[in-house]
Image (cartoon, helix red, strand yellow):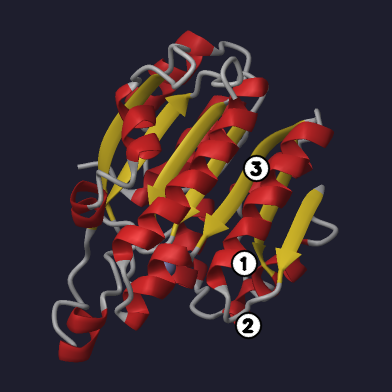
């Protein structure tokens, strides 16, 4: 079973950057990526907070863009996309260490990033920073506390302040992600983190609505990835933080499984 730990080694291998990790690159993704783009130029990695494989399946009526990207189905405009779906083991049940593992390829006990206060203290470098050191520009659109340690180390950093209105928060994440893709031709790897599903899960709110909102945001991001003829990677970070499960305190020690979608989105602009 693939693991979220393998994403950073896969990206490092694709971009030809040295990264130390106990995990191996995912050959299936590398074959897919090189077959489409032998010279790597644009990869966007979107983490959808709390999207585990169960929610991905349960919410398939709302997550139509994600499912289309994963299966390489036809775009609304008839454009031909190409995609892969892998199921990955998670490495943590908490967002900050999970995302740090996704970006470093290291287990939580190895990167020691457990809270946002740890983000600036770790001496372990993310794939974003490692690429920057080799002159390949990267970017991140994330919550302000996670973003601030990256200023000066990553070319294009945009922090969005945490707020009660998570839908507005994700809209800003989406808009800045698209803005960087449209304005910064040099950026090769861009990371973004969408949180609506996680917030709705914690509150016990309607996950169908959260999924619909998230899918619309992903659809717009996919469109701008298509404009650049780039690759879009989408994954969850941990098993869903559903209120019922959290209240019962059960199974939280168990690791989960999350989808990892790899897609070369086709443009839908012909009809929009
Ligand atoms: Zn999370």
Q: Do the residues labelled 2 and 1 touch (CB within 8 Å)?
A: no
Q: Depth-wise, is mark 2 or mark 1 nearer the camera?
A: 1
Q: Depth-wise, is mark 3 or mark 2 nearer the camera?
A: 3
Of the numbered discs in the image, which one, if any, rests on residue 50?
A: none
Residue under the image location 53 percent in, 80 percent down: 115
Residue under the image location 73 percent in, 35 percent down: 181
Q: What element carries label 3?
A: strand
N-term mark: 2 or 1? 2
Q: Name the residue under label 2.
A: 117
Query: Between 47 and 67, which is closer to the camera in this rendering?
Result: 67
238 left or right, relative to 169? left
The quadrant the C terminus occupies is top right
Query: Between 139 and 81, which is closer to the camera in this rendering?
Result: 81
Q: Is mark 3 within 8 Å of ligand 1?
A: no
Quadrant in which ligand 1 is drawn: bottom left
Q: Do the residues labelled 3 and 2 touch (CB within 8 Å)?
A: no
Residue under the image location 50 percent in, 43 percent down: 218
Q: Distance between the residues labelled 2 and 1?
A: 21 Å
Q: Residue 255 sits in which quadrant?
A: bottom left
Q: Depth-wise, is mark 3 or mark 1 nearer the camera?
A: 1
């Amino acid at each position: 079973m693939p693991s979220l730990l393998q994403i950073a080694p896969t990206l490092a291998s694709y971009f030809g950057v040295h990264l130390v990790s106990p995990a191996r690159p995912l050959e299936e993704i590398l074959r897919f990526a090189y077959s489409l783009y032998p010279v790597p130029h644009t990869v966007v990695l979107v983490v959808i907070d709390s999207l585990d494989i169960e929610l991905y399946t349960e919410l398939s009526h709302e997550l139509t863009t994600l499912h289309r990207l994963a299966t390489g189905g036809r775009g609304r405009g008839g454009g031909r996309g190409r995609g892969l779906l892998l199921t990955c083991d998670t490495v943590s049940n908490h967002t900050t260490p999970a995302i740090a593992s996704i970006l470093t390829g290291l287990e939580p006990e190895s990167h020691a990033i457990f809270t946002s206060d740890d983000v600036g203290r770790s001496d372990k470098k993310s794939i974003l920073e490692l690429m920057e050191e080799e002159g390949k520009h990267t970017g991140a659109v994330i919550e302000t506390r996670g973003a601030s340690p990256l200023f000066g180390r990553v070319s294009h950093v945009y922090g969005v302040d945490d707020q009660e209105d998570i839908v507005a928060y994700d809209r800003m994440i989406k808009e800045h992600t698209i803005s960087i893709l449209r304005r910064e031709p040099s950026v090769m790897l861009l990371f973004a983190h969408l949180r609506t599903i996680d917030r709705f899960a914690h509150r016990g709110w309607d996950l169908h609505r959260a999924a619909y909102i998230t899918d619309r945001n992903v659809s717009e991001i996919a469109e701008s990835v298509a404009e650049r003829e780039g690759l879009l990677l989408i994954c969850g970070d941990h098993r869903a933080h559903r209120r019922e499960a959290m209240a019962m305190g059960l199974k939280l020690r168990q690791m989960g499984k999350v989808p990892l979608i790899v897609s070369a989105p086709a443009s839908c602009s012909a009809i929009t």
